[in-house]
Amino acid sequence: MLPGKSGDVSEFWPNRRVLVTGATGLVGSWLVASLVATRAYVVALVRDYDPQSELVRSGSIRQVHVVNGVLEDYAALERAVNEHEIETVFHLGAQTIVGVALRSPFATFEANIRGTYNLLEACRVHSNLVKRIVIASSDKAYGDTDILPYIEEMPPLGRHPYDVSKSCADLLARAYHETYELPVAVTRCGNIYGGGDLNWSRIVPGTIRSLDLGERPIIRSDGKFLRDYLYVQDAVQAYLRTAEALDRPAVQGHAFNFAPDQPRTVIEVVETLCRLMGREDLPPVILNKVKAEIRDQYLSSEKARRLLGWSAAYSFEQGLSETVEWYRRFLNPRPLARHETT
């Protein structure tokens, strides 16, 4: 079945045993919800119980099997794979904030690099169980280059802590496939946005919260950095399509880019949100103080279209409109009626 809107239900997933790391994150929460809807047997690796996570708020956490643990703990990952007889792994868990990586490179390397080889090793040890592994990478893995858009044949050349951690994870996935024939594929997405992202330093949730509070949004760069912006529901479909195709030699061991193929500047994103929220009276404050970030980066998704039948189903404004509505409900919750408190 080719990708579509988030209501699509695949016949591939019922009763399949799936492990999702990073299940409380932005993409992980929505991926789990989609898998639950398809009646998959879902195991979620959870480091910290976060009641504000979409995984918890949506009620999905009550419909999955939770393994408490961290990526840095090999025993926890091996136990999750073995005891739950996992067939499919979505490795989304990581330290994903560029600023945090800049301040704490060691912790980022531990989570993103050690965590990845721990998981791959657990899958290698139990290769009789695990039949497909999707490793979530990033466009940051490519590093800085004058040649754009990124295509999958370009080598991973990250320079800064977060970028390097994703480059290393990509190389580890390739090593485990080439050496041990693990059925691995790597997904490289542009900037993913959508309801449930509570990292307010990111441009979409940070701007929406500022506008909701009647404050001018903050742009840390000069506003001209060029990026892909991929709606979370399109990202979920990308992960699912990749996993479903992992029995094919043309997919195993390969990386795939996912993006809407319409890069935009940060200022364009902020101005669109101002218009959608009716707050064009609040122009952004441009700090121009960002460092250790690549200026322009965007991806070609031609390979994913050709081999996976994937393309972004949501327009930029459709995705942002749904995102704004999610945050309006989150930031302005409906007061409980008297009968709801008793």
Image (tube, grey):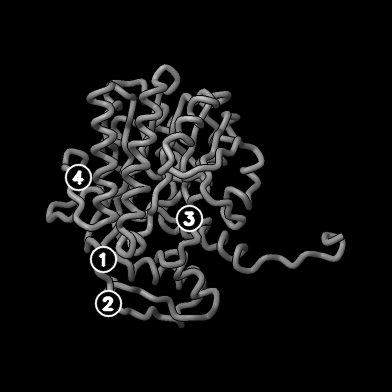
Nearest-to-viewer mark from 2 and 4: 4
Disc 2 to disc 4, C-alpha distance: 27 Å
Name the residue type under label 3.
Answer: Gly
Label 1 SS: loop
Q: Earlier in the sequence, mark 4 or mark 1?
A: 4
Q: Secondary structure at mark 3?
A: loop
In the foreground, 61 or 149: 61
Q: On the image, numbered disc 2 is attached to which residue? A: 288
Residue beneath the point at 45% across and 49% down: 232
The mark nearer the N terminus, 1 or 2, is: 1
Circles 1 and 3, Cβ within 8 Å, touching? The answer is no
Image coordinates of residue 259 in percent, x first then y, are 33, 48
Give whichever of discs 3 and 2 has the lower sequence position. Answer: 3
Contact flag, marks 1 and 2 (Cβ < 8 Å): no
Label 1 to label 3, Cα distance in Å? 20 Å
Tag 4 and tag 3, C-beta contact below 8 Å: no
* Distance of label 1 from label 2 (alpha carbons): 11 Å
Q: Nearer the viewer, mark 3 or mark 2?
A: 2
Q: Amino acid at mark 4?
A: Pro
Residue type, numbered disc 2: Asn
Report if residue 11 is visible in the image. no
Q: Which residue is mark 3?
A: 194
Distance Cα–Cα, label 3 vs label 2: 25 Å
**Is residue 223 shown above or below 75?**
below
Residue 151 coordinates in the image, percent (x, y): 20, 43
Residue holding disc 4: 156
Read off the residue under disc 1: 225
Return the residue found at the far top. Answer: 128
**Where, by quadrant of the figure, is residue 83 drawn?**
top right
Identify residue type, mark 1.
Phe
Q: Name the residue at the bottom extreme.
A: 281
Q: Residue at x 26, y 36 (%)?
A: 172
